[in-house]
Image (cartoon, grey):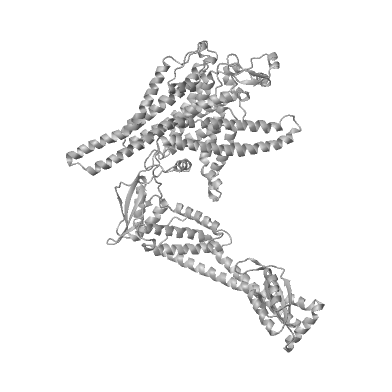
Amino acid sequence: MGTMFRSEEMVLCQLFVQPEAAYVSMYELGEAGIAQFRDLNPHVNDFQRRYVSEVRRCSEMERKLRWVAGELPEPPPPPKPDRCSLSPREINILEERIDFIESEIQEITRNARNLKSDYLSLIELKTLIEKMQTFFQDHSAQRKISASVQIYNNDAVLGHLGFIAGVVTTARIPAFEKMLWRISHGNIFFKQAQIDEPLKDPITGHELQKTVFVVFFHGEQIKLRVKKVCHGFKATLYPCPATYKDQLDMLAGVGTRIKDLEMVLEQTENHRRLVLTNIARDISTWMVAVRKEKAIYHTLNMFSMDIVKKCLIAECWVPRRDLTVVQKALENGVKASGSPIPSILHYVPTHETPPTFNRTNKFTRGFQNLIDSYGIASYREVNPALYTIITFPFLFAVMFGDVGHGIIMTAFAAILVIYEKKFSKVQTDNEIWNIFFGGRYIILLMGIFSIYTGLIYNDMFSKSLNIFGTSWRNVYEDGVLQNHTMLELDPKTAYTQTPYPFGLDPAWQFASNNIIFLNSFKMKLSIIFGVIHMAFGVTMSVVNFNFFKKQEMIFLQYIPQILFLLLLFWYLCLLMFMKWIMYSAVAEDPASGTSCAPSVLIIFINMMLLKSSEDKPPCRAMMYDGQDQVQKTFLAIGFLCIPVMLFGKPVYKMIMAKKRKQYQQGVETGEEVEKEGHDGGMAEELITQCIHTIEYVLGAVSHTASYLRLWALSLAHAQLSAVLWQRVLIMGMGYPGVNSLKLYVIFAVWAFFTLAILVLMEGLSAFLHTLRLHWVEFMSKFYEGQGYAFAPFCFTDILENEDDERKAAAETNGGPPE
Amino acid sequence: MGASFVPITVFTLLWGIVGIVCPFFAPKGPNRGIIQVVLMLTAATCWLFWLCAYMAQMNPLIGPRLNNETLIWMSRTWRDGMTIRHDWKEIRPFKIFITVVIHSLS
């Protein structure tokens, strides 16, 4: 049954590789992704390993590249496919180049920053002077101040007014003013004006709101204090000439300097952009190369070193089918290094449990994930994913059966499947989308099966299709029809005696008693499929017993289990089939007529409770002759199976142990210690077996009942769909003409709820119930799930994981780490 | 008895072909086994599902309880069940199905 039936056979290999050849070999193995390396120096600290300096070098390069990538104005293009490894020389060149680029960009950035802060202070000075001019000139009330200031400055006469001008952050102005007022006891004059255009901080790039201020004061003492306050409030002070003429001169000077600086800044920016665009093309490719390099050295660190022979020893799990690939990689490594000593591959026999590796393709991966999320299969155990491909969508469809909803689901999945190449290129963090996209083949099959079950249920948005012509016809005269609103069709007369050939008869859709009919049908259906599904699961265990050479378990466990299930629960299913065939409304014998049809469930309960029921003429209590004896026999055999399940395995083990001991005693004298140890094991064995048996016997009952969820969910789905049609869409129908507009709106409402509730939510709940039916009811019958997954050294996985980690880090830190 | 020969044969044959004949013609390759299992399980589940629905209606013990308007509408628009069953070749889906089968065989 191909690759999926069991996990792959794994081999533990030992590789003896020359250090020179190791790098290329590892590169090839990383590309192939087929070997899981084991850490041979688990006790060695990470910092004491052989290739620590290389790993550190790669990390450093990676950090630099990441920083440069963060400086890029737009995300870099994806890496070029490059499938050959870099030689150590190329790596050195790359490292130098990355170093050079990083320092160059840092240099440019630093220069740009300096220039920008110069530019900022010039702009501030310019605005300051402009504002000052208005302070000094425009207000007539201040003429006096202006005059006295001029005198003060020109003549340096004490006792006149002095002033200090500067720029301070707008937010600090109120506190600043208050503080000035306090220190001078109100003996200053404070003027301020906000700078209208916002300035940019050269370092952070944030916008700054600043205000120009002038403080007029009297005396040196206050001047010192004012300066201190200015310093405390981080105000920038600018020397400002007092006379108008000087101010004009200064303004002109500042203007030319600003123009020069603007030019320089523009050139710096252009240069920076040029450098960045030059490297943008290659940066992803380099990043990939560096990460691969790092991963290789990381793996090489797990190897142990044979000091005498100067060669590296590695241990890895490899699927047996891929051994040739490993061999080839080793040969290529030797060839590339030109070393005369070949690398050696060598199988190690081991008792360790190998990892579980199921080779999947894009179609089977989704199903395998469903199984793996329950538990990774034990090594070489039967893999239920193979059967899940069909049973999962089918059981889902039993609950979700509706042609219309199935078509919607199929169309959605078909779009995903048809354009999968396009979609898979787009990497998103949208988890819901990724789940849907990852499960597109599951959804597709679920949709197709829903269409089929919908056709059988004859249900399309709660309406039926009459393709083959109904089997029911109207037998009532016009008079009767006029007098009664509800009429029940009698199967004796109104039924054509041949059923609707495919699915349920469309007449049932209109019937007010259709739930009675549907319940009886769907309940029986659920039990029939449930018992078959469980019996299938139990039978799977035979394959495992055969494979693991535990043939005795077939008799000790499988046969009693399957007998118990079939004799009790499959018998129930047989009774259902018999009831469908034997009892008829048109039967000549009244004992098999409508009124005598027995309830299968009651027969089953009576069988379990050993109750005998009596004939009530013309009806018979039993469906066939000798039924009572048959049922009692079945019950007896079924219950006799329980002690076999309970004691079979422990007793068998005990006998085997005794035999072995006798044999050992024949060879050498007995060992007391082992015997004691065995007794403890025996009790434990009994308890485990007891738990298993109870679980199975009770499980057979509860799991059978659990399959009734198929009926419950399918009923709920059909009813919800009917309610939505009758309560919502019907409102828009009726009188033609006026209602068309209303229908337009109501259809939108109906379509929305159909999608949101019936397809999405009901689909989700049916999905979860199907998952449960597989995990609990089906897989508990044979699946151990004690394995661990195969995690090969594979570049594509490593690169993807790092991308994810980086994204997560970026989200939490709010930016690329520098 | 309510069973009718034609539909039982048609659907059993149909799913028999899918589940028993088709697996022999599954494309060779690593996925041959998977395709065979898929075909067999599909046929088995779908056939059994259809069979249950068919058998549940073979001998109805109760009839649908219908509105009188629905009954009138049924007898006017849906032709009588009996007549339709005898000339089932006239029914379009069957015609399409048969032509598809013939085309695919030739």
Relative to the observer, which residue lies in front, A527 or A363?
Answer: A527
Q: Is residue A660 visible?
A: yes
Residue A375 appears in which quarter of the rendering? Answer: top left
Q: Can residue B105 be seen in this snapshot?
A: no
Classify residue A344 as left or right of residue A222: left
Residue A276, percent from left and from top: 55, 64
**Rendered location of residue A540, percent (x, y):** 39, 34
Q: Which residue is at a point 56% across and 25% down the rendered structure image?
A: A518
| Image side of residue B53 versus residue A164, left or right | left
In front here: A126 or A219? A219
Residue that protrudes farthest toward the right in the picture: A140
The quarter of the picture where the N terminus of chain A appears is: top left
Residue A85 x, y percent position in the rendering = 42, 58
Measuring 22% from the left and 38% from the top, which residue is drawn there?
A661
**Compared to A815, does B99 lie above or below?**
above
For residue A719, what is the image quadrant? top right
The residue closer to the viewer here, A402 or A779, is: A779
